[in-house]
């Protein structure tokens, strides 16, 4: 069902790419997208063994489950906090007093770095209802039941320039990578960074945005009009409309400044990150267009060309997805 191939990653360590062939040997026929899946490879670590990936594929879902799915550094944490609050009657006290990763665990976390408990088992055992589960996996590697049982998926996309800059700082801060930003852009475009290919990840969900169980939103839209996103998401999740005062409290709670100040959502303080660069910040800038004063024009041009050539095939413009950046 899976095929894999070895590649050399940005850090020089061996990584591999994984493809899901599905039961018919062609592609994952359970994902509601007709396309040639033979070019859908996902770069992962060696901890993603066939057994581990199969356990994710077979993960037993519940009808009330909600999955937050993103490419890395696209606003996952921000969306998890928002979705958790909507699903929990805007329990701001609860959000202010417990780790987001406990309230909304990360399905494939054990595949990235050693964690005390097996992350798939952790998600499996969550008692609270509904479960809110985070994943960075592309559509074809997610639990099959998401597609066969129409489980709710919230997908957040963010423009590739800000994603690459944010990922660079994150990996440098975690000492996973020590190259220059320009070199990192090359690795990113060449699919040598974990969870790439970026564009196939985003475009597959963009094309499924009208599926009833998919809520597609961008980081840029959240920055532009968070209240409107809250209203849209609230309808998608079947939650009650918020009063003006609830909306005000919620939007205030979700502000970058407030979330940066909270140890429960700002992973800078988390224990598994023991070997950090001194200036590491999980909540870094929190803006749209941080690439503008950080990426060289050479790297911006490379990303522009790569983006145009990828999207051409689908007849989609980047501004269709993100608006004008
Ligand atoms: S991860 O590790 O992949 O789950 O990271 P993720 O949460 O997807 O992305 C981290 C980036 O999101 C920014 N962020 C926010 N921006 C605006 N408002 C709020 N409330 C917020 N919370 C997190 C965070 O700062 C990272 O982006 P950069 O550009 O690095 O600042």
Image (spheres, rainbow, N blue to C red):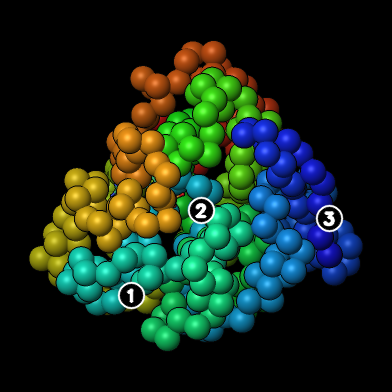
Q: Quadrant of residue 251?
A: bottom left
Judging depth in this view, the residue of 96 and 234 nearest the camera is 96
Q: Position of residue 69 (x, y in %)?
A: 51, 59
Q: Residue 87: give its label.
A: 1
Sequence-first disc among 2 and 1: 2
Residue topped by disc 2: 70
Residue positioned 43% across, 34% down in the render: 169
Q: Are marks 2 and 3 in contact (CB under 8 Å)?
A: no
Q: Quadrant of the C terminus?
A: top left
Q: Which residue extends farthest right?
A: 25
Residue 249 in which image quadrant: bottom left
Q: Is residue 117 left or right of residue 200?
A: left
Left or right of 168: which side holds 22?
right
Q: Is residue 16 above or below residue 150?
A: above
Q: CA distance from mark 1 to mark 3?
A: 37 Å
Mark 2 or mark 3, whichever is nearer to me = 3
In this figure, which residue is indicated by the disc labeled 3?
A: 3
Q: Decide: marks 1, 3 in contact (CB < 8 A)? A: no
């Amino acid at each position: 069902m899976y095929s894999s191939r070895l590649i050399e990653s940005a850090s020089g360590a061996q990584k591999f790419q994984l493809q899901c062939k599905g039961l018919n040997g062609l592609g994952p026929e359970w994902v509601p997208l007709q396309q040639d899946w033979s070019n859908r490879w996902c770069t992962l670590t060696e901890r993603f063994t066939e057994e581990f990936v199969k356990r994710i594929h077979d993960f037993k879902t519940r009808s009330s489950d909600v999955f937050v799915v993103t490419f890395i550094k696209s606003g996952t944490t921000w969306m998890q906090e928002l979705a958790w609050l909507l699903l929990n009657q805007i329990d701001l006290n609860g959000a202010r007093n417990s780790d987001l990763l406990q309230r909304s665990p990360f399905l494939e976390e054990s595949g990235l770095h050693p964690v005390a408990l097996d992350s798939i088992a952790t998600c499996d055992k969550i008692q609270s209802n509904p479960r809110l589960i985070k994943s960075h996996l592309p559509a074809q590697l997610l639990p099959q039941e998401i597609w066969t049982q129409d489980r709710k998926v919230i997908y957040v996309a963010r423009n590739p320039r800000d994603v690459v800059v944010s990922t660079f700082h994150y990996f440098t801060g975690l000492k996973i990578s020590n190259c220059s930003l320009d070199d990192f852009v090359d690795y990113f475009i060449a699919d040598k960074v974990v969870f790439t290919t970026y564009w196939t990840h985003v475009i597959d969900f963009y094309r499924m945005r009208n599926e009833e169980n998919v809520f597609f939103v961008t980081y840029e839209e959240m920055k532009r009009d968070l209240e409107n996103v809250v209203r849209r998401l609230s309808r998608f999740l079947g939650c009650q409309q918020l009063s003006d005062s609830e909306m005000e409290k919620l939007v205030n709670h979700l502000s970058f400044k407030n979330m940066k100040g909270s140890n429960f959502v700002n992973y800078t303080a988390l224990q598994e990150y023991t070997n950090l660069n001194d200036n590491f910040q999980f909540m870094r800038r929190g803006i749209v267009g941080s690439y503008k004063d950080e990426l060289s024009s050479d790297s911006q041009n490379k990303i522009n060309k790569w983006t145009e050539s990828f999207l051409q095939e689908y007849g989609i413009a980047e501004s269709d997805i993100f608006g004008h950046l």
